[in-house]
């Protein structure tokens, strides 16, 4: 239970939240954003026309209170609307807060073809880590690149010299210098960009914790409200069978 709480609520990572947002079941609640206002408008119109309906025929005057009682917006629809609102707000927070190299595609090829400025996004992520004060992320970036047999020479991520998009670097792969030049140009080479892409995804997967937690709570609220809706509908189905 503690692991579940840590993984999905207390410290959910962006890639976990991404899975939440892609759940097809949330699309069911999203449709109520269109249906619920239409139903509400019909009910409001009926209430506004109460006097006219009752005066139209004596039978309608007697039946209208019963009709009005049964035409209230069902609780299940209210739950679905709440679920849709939570999901849409969570989606908006996810789109604004999640790093683009995590939310756009699961492979480097998908990311590169979905973004016109894919290299700029990678350079921006690298510079954010280099200019930041989080030593752990800088070390994780260096170790991640070393694990892929990639290292930067002349300008180091954790060094005292500030790293900029125009900074000249020598990129060493498997012990051999393969690319030299400004960071923004070197990362345009697919074999280099791919290495930085996967390392950045791992390093930045736990960035912006407050935003991640807010997004995860909204998505989980959407799922809980959907669950209550299902319980209500199953209850009505069981009652119908037993009658």
Image (cartoon, rainbow, N blue to C red):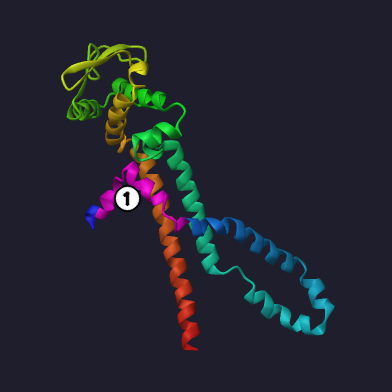
**Left-right relation of 22 to 41:** left
- Residue 102 vertical position relative to residue 64 in the rendered view, above or below: above
Question: Which residue sits at x=50%, y=59%?
Answer: 28
The N terminus - image quarter: bottom left
Give the image location of residue 15, x and y in percent.
33, 43
In front here: 123 or 42? 123
Give the image location of residue 72, x and y in percent.
62, 70
- Residue 104 vertical position relative to residue 12 in the rendered view, above or below: above
**Left-right relation of 35 to 49:** left
Give the image location of residue 150, x and y in percent.
21, 23
Magenta run includes residue 12: yes
Which quadrant of the structure image shows residue 129? top left
* Prevalent SS, magenta region: helix
- Residue 66 vertical position relative to residue 40 in the rendered view, above or below: below
Question: Which residue sits at x=32%, y=31%?
Answer: 197
Magenta run includes residue 60: no
Q: What stretch is highlighted in magenta?
A: 4-26
Task: Identify the residue at the far left of this view.
Answer: 175
Question: Which residue sits at x=47%, y=28%?
Answer: 116
Which quadrant of the structure image shows residue 69? bottom right
In front here: 9 or 145? 145
Please count the marks in the image. 1
In front here: 95 or 46? 95
Asked if residue 138 shows in the view, the reply is yes
Question: Which residue sits at x=24%, y=25%?
Answer: 138
Asked if residue 99 shows in the view, the reply is no
> Disc 1 designates what residue?
9
Q: How crowded is mark 1: few (under 14 residues within 10 Å), some or many (20 or more)?
A: some
């Amino acid at each position: 239970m503690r692991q579940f709480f840590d993984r999905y609520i207390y410290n959910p990572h962006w890639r976990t939240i991404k899975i939440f947002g892609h759940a097809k079941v949330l699309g069911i609640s999203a449709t109520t954003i269109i249906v619920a206002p239409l139903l509400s408008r019909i009910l409001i119109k009926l209430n506004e026309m109460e006097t006219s309906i009752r005066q139209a025929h004596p039978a309608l005057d007697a039946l209208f209170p019963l009709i009005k009682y049964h035409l209230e917006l069902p609780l299940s629809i209210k739950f679905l609307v709440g679920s849709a609102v939570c999901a849409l707000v969570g989606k908006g927070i996810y789109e604004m807060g999640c790093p683009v190299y995590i939310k756009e595609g699961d492979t480097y090829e998908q990311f590169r073809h979905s973004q016109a400025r894919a290299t700029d996004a990678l350079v921006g992520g690298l510079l954010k880590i280099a200019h930041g004060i989080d030593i752990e992320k800088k070390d994780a970036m260096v170790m991640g690149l070393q694990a892929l047999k990639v290292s930067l020479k002349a300008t180091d991520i954790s060094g005292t010299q500030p790293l900029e998009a125009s900074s000249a670097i020598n990129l060493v792969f498997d012990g051999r210098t393969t690319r030299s030049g400004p960071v923004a140009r070197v990362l345009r080479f697919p074999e280099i960009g791919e290495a930085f892409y996967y390392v950045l995804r791992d390093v930045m997967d736990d960035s912006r914790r407050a935003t991640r937690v807010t997004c995860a709570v909204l998505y989980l609220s959407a799922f809980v409200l959907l669950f209550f809706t299902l319980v209500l509908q199953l209850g009505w189905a069981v009652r119908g069978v037993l009658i």
